[in-house]
Image: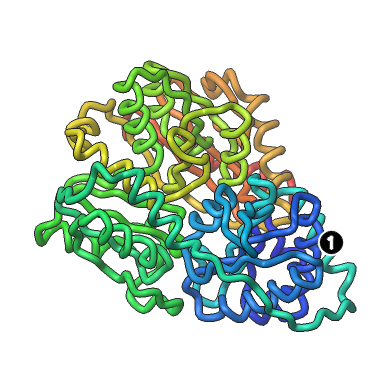
Amino acid sequence: MQHIFREYDIRGVFEKDLTESVVKRIGYFLGKEIKKHGDYAVVTYDARTHSPRLSDWLVSGLNAAGVVVLHGGMVPTPVNYFCNYHAFEVGGRKVTPAGGIQITGSHNPPEYNGFKITIGQAPFYGEAIYALGREVEANEAMAIATQTDAIEIPALETYVRYLADAFAHLEGFDPGIAIDCGNGAAGVALEPLLEALKIPAKKLYFEPDGTFPNHHPDPSEEENLQDLKKALESGAKYGFAFDGDGDRIAFLSRKYNFKGDILALFFAKEMAKEGKKPKVIGEVKCSQIMYDGIDAIGEAIMYKTGHSNLKVLLRETGADLAAEVSGHIFFNDRYFGYDDAIYAMMRILEMLKNGFDFDAEFEKLPTLYSTDEIKVPTTDAKKFAIIEALEGLLRERREALGIRDIVTIDGVRVIFEDGWGLVRASNTTPILVTRFEAKSPEALQRIRETLEALIKEAKKEVG
């Protein structure tokens, strides 16, 4: 059972891993944690076909723990996060939730589902999730009655109204956009928001359908952007795509696909125009272009991959923004510090209205050559040991290989004079993740071959 309790969330296959008994116990023991902060918790879910059933089981466990459930129905994940910062009327008085649970499989295949959890406005992750898993497993014989009582709240309406008010200055703006929701949950928020602001768009797959009949809802994979690219070829100037639960964004012009780290640099530049010295957190996979560009106008901080890690550091440092290459964008500037792809889209539209030329700004950046993420299969038992062995080999041969620095915030980011390579253990799957970037194709090839050879050596050492 423990494999479903992951670093950042809980995720597994419906009715194989996520059975009625398991989910009710998750609800119960989560409820006990939430009760330390208050009486109320928000439950919402994404577009997956089994999300309503999981909701009934989860709510039953929460009720058994004495939590009062506020139910917001089907919404994108950022709406659940949003609810933790807003009061709702319950029994004639305003209450703010002590926790929130979004039922979502994010961008996983249709048979998957899971839970993203917030308690006390902070992500519930890492050792807290692992401890929850041990408690759920230790109480296997526990029986929890079905009790699905919940108070309905206008979660989606409150969120849409907030964004419509925050971006009222965009009313009627028409830069020529196409939006692909991938039949995930983002469409249920985008439809009323675009309508409220009278922003026209070519809409692709806004209808929630947990079987994802048109393409997989993962905009970080180029193959899932083909329909959006066709819309750009047939008249749209800009395209937006969302993952299954609406917390990751892809933004494209007719010429370029702007990854999360480059977007972070552009957001920082826009903040600098307003007189700020932006402080921005990036993950270890982010381009050196982002770090150097932000350091020229403010402060860039390199940190671990993972939405929970970035949210925590954002709160601790008071930084303005955090970003992952994959399209998780976290605004603390004028917002609440969690990853919200719909909010990020509105900030991009605002920049377009202000005259920001994304293509021209991209073309001003230094030319670097990079790979996408390359996944190296291994096992959960060995992946961290391989990273440790690899770090030892790198330190032994640092001088011979011409290594300038070894950054060990999350795996190893190996910095050479003409580029860098990253090798890290995934926190959620039995793989090593690698990425490479350099000043020339030849340097890129050399750095990649050097590190891939050392990974093989480290694997042999671990056995």
Q: Closest to the observer: 384 or 401?
A: 384
In the rendered view, does 389 fall on the left or right side of 417? Answer: right
Counting from the top left corner in percent of width and height, residue 369 is at 33, 35
Q: Amino acid at mark 1?
A: Arg
Q: Residues within 10 Å of mark 1 (few under 14, many from 20)?
A: few
Residue 38 x, y percent position in the rendering:
75, 53
Residue placed farthest to the front in the image? 92
Image check: 244 left or right of 312?
left
Q: Residue furthest left?
A: 235
Question: From this viewpoint, is residue 426 visible?
Answer: yes
Q: Quadrant of residue 72?
A: bottom right
Q: Is residue 17 above or below residue 230?
A: below
Q: Which residue is mark 1?
A: 134
Quadrant of res 216: bottom left
Name the spot of residue 64 as percent of width and height, x first.
80, 72
| Residue that appears at 32% across and 32% down | 266
Q: Is residue 38 left or right of residue 164?
A: right
The structure residue drawn at horizontal position 36% and vertical position 23%, both measured from the top left corner, is 293
Of helix, strand and loop, which one carries label 1?
helix
Q: Position of residue 151 (x, y in %)?
A: 62, 70
In terms of depth relative to the viewer, which is nearer, 160 or 291? Answer: 160
